[in-house]
Image (cartoon, rainbow, N blue to C red):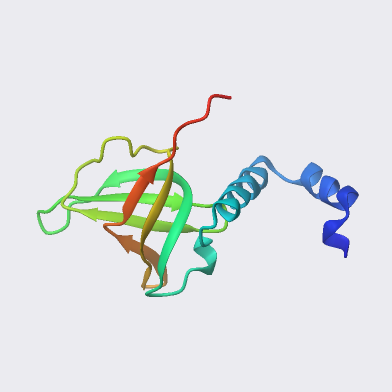
Amino acid sequence: MAGTNPLLRALRRWGASNEELVAQERQRTADESGSTRIGDAKDRQQVMLRGFVTALKMEPRGGTPWLEATFSDGSQAITLIWMGRRGIPGITAGREMSIEGRVLVVDGERRMYNPRYSLIAEVAR
């Protein structure tokens, strides 16, 4: 099988952009943790995901604050929404997390409302 050839894997990595390498590393980490890839999550499926917050913003809706985070595992992204929250200690852009909840597809976009989360300890490099 060509995908298992170490030389071919090395050549693919050598020709990959930094973004592609980061995405591959995030997918590997998610796969090793036993979580579902965002790209594989189906509408209304209860899942555990592992990845990184790539963007964070507070979007008021009808006078109520909504904290929205773009969360990626390297395969795709999902919008996490915590209703009634302006911020959550520890959740920042670049933070690695594990989240659990039900995926909803709204207007073609994956979302998860009020997911349970665990912050992953940062590793010194």
Q: Is residue 13 above or below residue 124?
A: below
Q: Is residue 25 above or below residue 41?
A: above
Q: Is residue 42 above or below residue 111?
A: below
Looking at the image, residue 4 sits to the left or right of residue 28; the answer is: right
Q: Quadrant of the C terminus?
A: top right
Which x, y percent locates residue 112?
34, 62
Q: Looking at the image, which residue is at 66% across and 40% down?
A: 18
Looking at the image, residue 121 sits to the left or right of residue 69; the answer is: right
Q: Looking at the image, which residue is at 63% across and 45% down?
A: 25
Which x, y percent locates residue 116?
31, 54
Which x, y percent locates residue 95?
43, 38
User: 97 or 83, which is in the foreground?
Assistant: 97
Looking at the image, residue 92 sits to the left or right of residue 66; the answer is: right
Q: Quadrant of the N terminus?
A: bottom right
User: 50 or 23, which is in the foreground?
Assistant: 50
Which x, y percent locates residue 113?
28, 61
The quadrant in which residue 5 appears is bottom right
Looking at the image, residue 45 sits to the left or right of residue 2; the answer is: left
The number of numbered badges drawn on the structure is: 0
Q: Looking at the image, which residue is at 82% across and 50% down?
A: 9
Residue furthest to the top in view is: 124
The quadrant in which residue 102 appears is bottom left
